[in-house]
Amino acid sequence: MPTMLLVLGLLICLVTSIDAQVGVCYGRNGDGLPSEQDVVSLYRNSGITKMRIYDPDQATLQALKGTNIELIIGVPNDALQSLNDQGTANTWVSNNIVNYPDVNFKYIAVGNEVDPNNGDAQYVNFVLPAMRNVQNAISAAGLGNQIKVSTATYSGLLGSSSPPSDGAFKANVVGYIQPIISFLDENNSPMLANVYSYFANPGSNLPYALFTASGTVVTDTNGLQYSNLFDAVLDAHYAAQARLGGGNLKIVVSESGWPSAGDPLATPENAGTYYRNLIGHVSGTTGTPLKPGSSIETYLFAMFDENKKTGAESEQHFGIFSLDQQNKYQLSFN
């Protein structure tokens, strides 16, 4: 009997650790969304134990009280400059973190996809100072070991990503990202990275992008073999970090998803296949070819379609639940 109980306990721990790898991003840039309380209930009823939000929405934080859902809370890009003032950062942390002791904060994403080469270039010089000030405020509140301060990057910062071992940041990105890598390493915090197979030329080999390839598709010059595009893009990020001294810096995939409309490849069938296979892949213990056996904490994008998003039409169709709270692809989180 003691042996059976020990085995049962180990199995429970394994299942818990696997389930805990998958979260879902909760964006609110759409009409007709359920109330914040209903959304949190949907997370709980669906067995989703991790959430990412993009700003300190007070109604969402209130709804999360006592749920133990692990949370990534975001600092919007247009708030970065204000947090370059330590007093303002202290107030932000007090109002949105310290005032919610019953919310299970895990990461603070200070900025999202800030890029020297696009419309967010105006925020580049504000990201690291804001991260430092938020870190100072978190530490002063005695939460430095509980909550990790990071920023969310994306594959657009890479100048080379194929093969994965050639992964490198663009030349004019290095001066921006290298100090951030050093900051994260010093504070034992992970890099957050948005990783999308959908935006990485999936049309050239759709099975490779959807995790349905029958075998190796890419053999890297270092001998590592890749059967899916997600691992290849993620390992390119790891290689790029390593070139700048971040070889031991863990990456949390803060977004990954596939749209269901707005593009010939954006179909409900492809989206469902991608989400189901992504969950299965990151819930295992295989890691990536470059990081075998490592966990891949991943947040699916997104909870609902967001019809107010700008850009390509496909941007509005990443939801995995319908507005009436039905699981569009019958995804299993537990």
Image (cartoon, grey):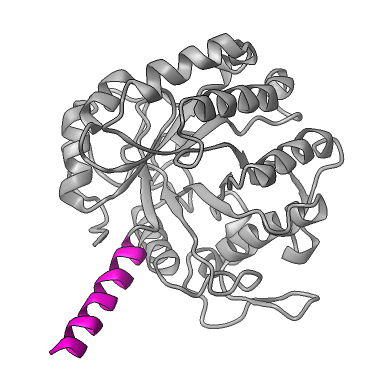
**In the rendered image, the vertical position of residue 281 relative to residue 108, given as above or below:** below
**In the rendered image, the vertical position of residue 285 relative to residue 192, given as above or below:** below
Q: Can residue 311 be seen in this view?
A: no
Location of residue 28 by image quarter: top left
Q: In this view, does 265 lie to the left or right of 70?
A: right
Q: Is residue 247 left or right of residue 113?
A: right
**In the rendered image, the vertical position of residue 48 relative to residue 127, given as above or below:** below
Between 137 and 172, the residue placed more toward the observer is 137
Q: Which residue is drawn at 47% across and 29% down?
A: 74
In the rendered image, residue 135, in percent from the top left (x then y), is placed at: 57, 29
Q: Which residue lies furthest to the left in this view?
A: 1
In the rendered image, residue 4, in percent from the top left (x then y), is placed at: 18, 88
Secondary structure mainly formed by the magenta segment: helix
Callout count? 0
Between 129 and 298, the residue placed more toward the observer is 129
Q: In which quarter of the image is the N terminus?
A: bottom left
Instruction: Please give the range of residues in magenta.
Output: 1-19
Q: Which residue is drawn at 54% across and 68% down?
A: 294
Q: Quadrant of the C terminus?
A: bottom left
Between 296 and 170, the residue placed more toward the observer is 296
Location of residue 113 by image quarter: top right
Magenta-drawn stretch contains 8? yes
Q: Which residue is drawn at 21% across and 35% down?
A: 39
In the rendered image, residue 5, in percent from the top left (x then y), is placed at: 17, 82
Magenta-drawn stretch contains 209? no
Q: Is residue 283 visible?
A: yes
In the rendered image, residue 256, in percent from the top left (x then y), is placed at: 48, 50
Q: Is residue 266 left or right of residue 226?
A: left
